[in-house]
Every structure is written in C-alpha cells, then in structure tokens.
Image (spheres, grey):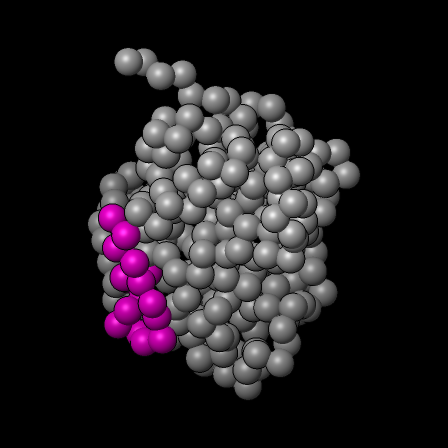
C-alpha cells in the first residue's frame, strides 16, 4: 500500500482499479522538551498506513509519501520548526494532486496530522476538487476517532500538543526519541480562552499559549496506550474511506 515502494506498472494497475490515494499532510515543528520535531509527520504517516491496510481488504488503496511541512507559523518562536504559507501549501498540493489525477486516479484523501492545517485543507479540497474534477476529501486523523480516543486517555479529552496522546503514540513507534526525564517540566494545562469560548477565532503564537511548547500532560503516557490510540484513529479513518458519501465527484456549474 506504499506508493514509494511500488513500481510504476503496479501504480498504473491501481489507478485502473479505481484505488483511493491517501496523501498524508503533516508538519515539522517543536513538540516541547521531550519529543522530536517529527511527531506530526511520524504519526500521520503511521495512521495512513494502518488505515490503508484495513481498507485494502475491501478496496484498492495506496498511501502517497507524506508532506512533512505544513502551516506552523504559530510554532516558529519556539524553534525547530519549518513552515509554509498558505499560497505555497495550495500550490504544492495542487501539483501533487494534479500528478495523481494525471495518472488516472480519481479519489484523493488528504489525511491531516497537524492542527494548524485543518481549515486550510478544507479550502484546498474545495478548490482542487472542482479544478481537477476529482472526488476529494480530508479529515484530521484524531477528529473522526474522538470518541474512541477519549475512552483511552486518562488526563485529557483528546489530542492536544506533545501531550498524553502524542507522547503515547511516539512511545509506541519510536521510544528511543522520547526524553522521559523531561515529562514533568513539559506538562501544561492551557487556560480556557474567552474569545474561543464565545465562538470567535484569534491567531495566537504558541509561545503566548504555553511556556513549555506543550499543551497537555505527557507524564501519564505509555506505549500500550499509544498502540490503542493509533489503532483507534486507523479504524475511524478506514470507516470514513469506505463510506461512499466520501467520494462525491464535483459537478461543474459553469
């Protein structure tokens, strides 16, 4: 199910079989004092692969290489971060999706692994589905799995940042990259923000939101919990991809 490991002839066959293409879109940014900057890219790629292995039992599917940089301007003050601006992200994804469509694929799913990409990817799907004449959809991997994940987590309701959830998942995949000695200093509970509570949106730097670069509690993380979280996400995304409602081809109105 990995595009990068297949031959061109195998990919042509997948296109002829109307395979779904999953394009993971993530980030490369600071994740506090205890996690590497590759967290979002690592986790998004893993959820994509676990999802594809489930879907492949019923439907042809292939996972494209992960886009490892996203919209991370809000993390720049804390170091270690690459960021795109939105015009660059749109241009990059347009080129990648156009390549996919030119090879005969007609269903593209942008799997998001970074909170800062969420609304931008909805705009990308709206723009490119009409432009390319392809059925396109997007989701942030923890959102369809929110209920499942909440039942696994102990100290928080869902994925935050470098938190119980993300730390657990990295422990499950790459424990050698986790610096457990700094868990206690990393934990930080963000106070409720009044504007957001009232339904508004204000851009805020992460450095203004948390002194540690973390929102959440990594001290209760575990590899066992991480495995369950990854599987919960994959199960939820697989269900979404197998739903015909995900694959509505746009009808031009002009």
Q: Which residue lies furthest to the bottom in this view?
A: 181
Give above or below for 124 relative to 234.
above
Q: Which residue lies furthest to the front in this view?
A: 9
Q: In this view, does 188 lie to the left or right of 225?
A: left
Please provide percent x and percent y for residue 33: 44, 79
Give me the residue at 49% from left, 41% from top. 100
For this rendering, which residue is in front, 80 or 196?
80
Q: Residue furthest right?
A: 57
Give above or below for 195 relative to 46.
above
Q: In this view, does 86 lie to the left or right of 240?
A: left
Please provide percent x and percent y for residue 224: 72, 65
> What residue range appears in magenta?
72-88
Please provide percent x and percent y for residue 43: 56, 60
For this rendering, which residue is in front, 5 or 79?
5
Whether residue 67 is visible: yes
Q: Is residue 74 magenta?
A: yes
Q: Is residue 64 magenta?
A: no
Give me the residue at 47% from left, 36% from top. 101
Give above or below for 136 relative to 220.
above
Please provide percent x and percent y for residue 54: 72, 43
Whether residue 160 is visible: no
Total marks shown come to 0
Q: In this view, does 252 lie to the left or right of 232?
A: left
Look at the image and tell me in which quarter the C terminus lies: top left
Give above or below for 59 relative to 41.
above
Give me the residue at 77% from left, 39% from top. 57
């Amino acid at each position: 199910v990995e595009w990068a490991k297949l031959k061109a002839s195998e990919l042509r066959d997948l296109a002829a079989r109307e395979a779904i293409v999953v394009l993971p879109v993530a980030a490369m940014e600071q994740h506090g004092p205890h996690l590497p900057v590759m967290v979002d890219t690592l986790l998004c790629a893993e959820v994509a692969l676990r999802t594809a292995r489930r879907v492949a039992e019923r439907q042809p599917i292939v996972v494209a290489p992960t886009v490892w940089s996203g919209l991370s301007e809000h993390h720049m003050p804390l170091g270690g971060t690459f960021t795109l601006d939105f015009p660059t992200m749109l241009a990059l994804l347009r080129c990648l999706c156009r390549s996919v469509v030119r090879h005969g694929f007609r269903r593209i799913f942008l799997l998001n692994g970074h909170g800062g990409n969420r609304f931008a990817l909805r705009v990308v799907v709206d723009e490119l589905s009409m432009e390319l004449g392809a059925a396109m959809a997007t989701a942030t991997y923890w959102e369809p799995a929110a209920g499942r994940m909440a039942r696994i987590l102990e100290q928080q309701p869902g994925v935050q940042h470098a938190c119980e959830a993300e730390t657990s998942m990295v422990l499950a995949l790459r424990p050698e990259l986790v610096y457990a000695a700094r868990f206690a200093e990393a934990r930080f509970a963000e106070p409720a923000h009044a504007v957001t509570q009232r339904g508004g949106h204000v851009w805020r730097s992460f450095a203004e939101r948390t002194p540690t670069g973390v929102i959440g509690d990594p001290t209760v993380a575990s590899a066992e919990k991480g495995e369950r979280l990854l599987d919960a996400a994959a199960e939820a995304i697989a269900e979404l991809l197998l739903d015909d409602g995900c694959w509505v081809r746009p009808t031009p109105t002009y």
